[in-house]
Amino acid sequence: MESELFGHLKGSFTGADKDKQGLFQAAKGGTLFLDEIADLPLQIQVKLLRVIQEKAVRPVGSQKEEAVDVRLLSATHKNLAREVELGNMRQDLFFRINVIELAVPSLRERQEDLQELTLTILNKIAKEDATTVCEIDDEALASLRQYSFPGNVRELENILQRAATLCEDRIIRAANLEFMNTPQAAETVEEIHPQAISDNAAQINNIVPESSSNDIPSDFSLEKHLESIEIGAIEKALEETRWNKTAAAKKLGNSFRSLRYRLKNLGLD
């Protein structure tokens, strides 16, 4: 990763048979786009922060820094502030790159763009396949509008690519659309099973501290109470996985790095 970003000199490591220019040097005087920046390893985040601050890079194996003038754009699908809290993102790097933030809403939040995006993608598919542009009927378009698109625009592209391949007479119909079978969140009370309501109520009762009255005790600490619940859940997951942290993290729906951070933060490591 360091070699890709900052370059390296010949002989600096095994396989480095010639000098290589990094992305920062290649983008000198222009723009460098770093996609999914939240997934950069912490050790690379440190080096990236230094490059941004000093406006200079030092290739792997070199003792000299090279000045670079680059406009930096970055993107991520994660909440960077949350990643900072979890210890996956350096706070100082977060503040350095978060100068102008552009939040791109998900496709389901901008349904008014769906028809135009669909027509644009169909034109793109026809150009790539050197065929005539597929049409899409009103019923199929209505089906697209009812879908939540967990995969956003990339998923729309895949759905239309598949439909354009399977459709007849170059007309996409509702039957040609295949959506991913993902459980959808209930949107109305009528869609929630009574047992689910009962289970949720039981969970809420477990969270609220037991008391002989309906009042919360005067010495009650919500933070400590939630912390004890978190500790209990983590310890239970570790016991069930025979203290395999990787398996426990998966059981809790967390990444290994996140679990390790929580263990350290809660004094359980």
Image (tube, grey):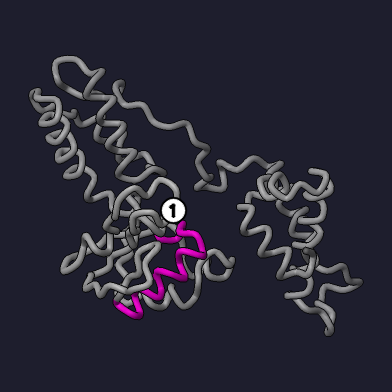
Task: Tell me the residue at 37%/56% (across/down).
Answer: 3
Magenta span: predominant SS is helix
Give percent across and percent down for residue 199. Answer: 74, 47
Provide the residue designation for mark 1. 13
Task: Specify the segment rendered in magenta.
Answer: 37-55
Q: Does the magenta stretch include residue 40?
A: yes
Q: Residue furthest front?
A: 11
Give percent across and percent down for residue 60. Answer: 39, 62
Task: Tell me the residue at 22%/49% (across/down).
Answer: 113
Task: Tell me the residue at 59%/66% (across/down).
Answer: 86
| Left-right relation of 206 to 27 | right
Give percent across and percent down for residue 243. Answer: 80, 49
Q: Nearer the viewer, residue 15 or 53?
A: 15
Displayed quadrant of residue 33: bottom left
| Left-right relation of 43 to 67 | right
Q: Which residue lies furthest to the right in this view?
A: 212
Element type where label 1 sits in the image: loop
The image shows residue 246, relative to residue 93, as above or below, that is above
